[in-house]
Image (cartoon, rainbow, N blue to C red):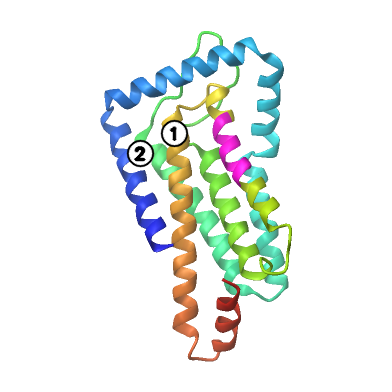
Amino acid sequence: MRTSAVISGVLALTLLLLVAVGWSPLLSFDRSVAEALHRSALAHPGFTHVNRVLTDWVWDPWTMRALAAVATVLLWWRKERRPALWVAGTSLLAAGLQQALKSLVDRDRPQWADPIDSARYSAFPSGHAMTATVTCGLLLWVLALYWRDEWRGWGTVAGVAAVSVLGVGFTRVYLGVHWPSDVVEGWLLGWFCVAVAVLTYRWSERREAPGGEGGHGSRMGGRR
């Protein structure tokens, strides 16, 4: 997990710098992909409508935040206070990081003569992509802590999470409200937040294992 955190963090920082300085090969790639998908969206209104439903309801950031809130409440109710705090805290910190970067970079969204959808605030990074990555990553982590060994539906849930994260990124570019690099940055930053959360959680368990919560740390560690 440490390697994953380092790689995602380095890649996210690199992409941030390339966007900030306006690296022309990246901007050209963004433009070419966005234009091709925009033409497709105009030509296939039925598929475009499906993408709007998915992005506005199924994979909307508020839907993802609601899932994280439910997970937090359930963990708290089960008296698993530490993972509950980690899920809630990571979700809030990720949202704050996302908004801070949007304000700092202040990247314009794609502009079209015939727009299909609209979105507010700056483009970079994609809030939909980042929120979905953080929420799905945290939920998979919680499931792995408690139920992975017993629950045969683990593969299905992991597949749904992967489709959600990748799918919401596609919808944002397909609907013409984000550049591809916005979405990639959202994925990278989201995974970085999840990886750091898991690492700090494990560190906190090891730190308290010799003390009064040693049994709890050992039990949870066995679920990893």
Where residue 88 sits in the image (x, y, percent)? 58, 60
Mark number, residue 104: 2
Does 61 appear above or below 38?
below
- The residue at 62%/65% (across/down) is 144
Query: Disc 1 on helix, strand or loop?
Result: helix
Residue closer to the observer: 3 or 183:
3
- The residue at 66%/20% (across/down) is 48
Does 51 appear above or below 15?
above
Residue mark closest to the camera, 2 vs 1: 1
Residue at which label 1 appears: 182
Q: Is residue 171 left or right of residue 150?
A: left
Does 20 appear above or below 174?
below
Where residue 87 sits in the image (x, y, percent)? 58, 61
Does 166 lie within the magenta span? yes
Does 223 lie within the magenta span? no
- Could you tell me which quadrant the N terminus lies in? bottom left
Query: Disc 2 on helix, strand or loop?
Result: helix
- Dominant SS of magenta comes to helix
Would residue 115 be visible to someone looking at this image?
Answer: no
Residue type of the residue flagged with mark 1: Asp
Q: Quadrant of residue 196?
A: bottom left
Mark found first going from the N terminus, 2 or 1: 2
Would residue 220 be visible to someone looking at this image?
Answer: yes
Packing grade of label 1 (10 A; few <14, some 14-19, many >=20) is many
Residue type of the residue flagged with mark 2: Leu
Q: Quadrant of residue 39?
A: top right
Packing grade of label 2 (10 A; few <14, some 14-19, many >=20) is few
- Could you tell me which quadrant the C terminus lies in? bottom right
- Range shown magenta: 162-170
Where residue 138 sits in the image (x, y, percent)? 58, 58
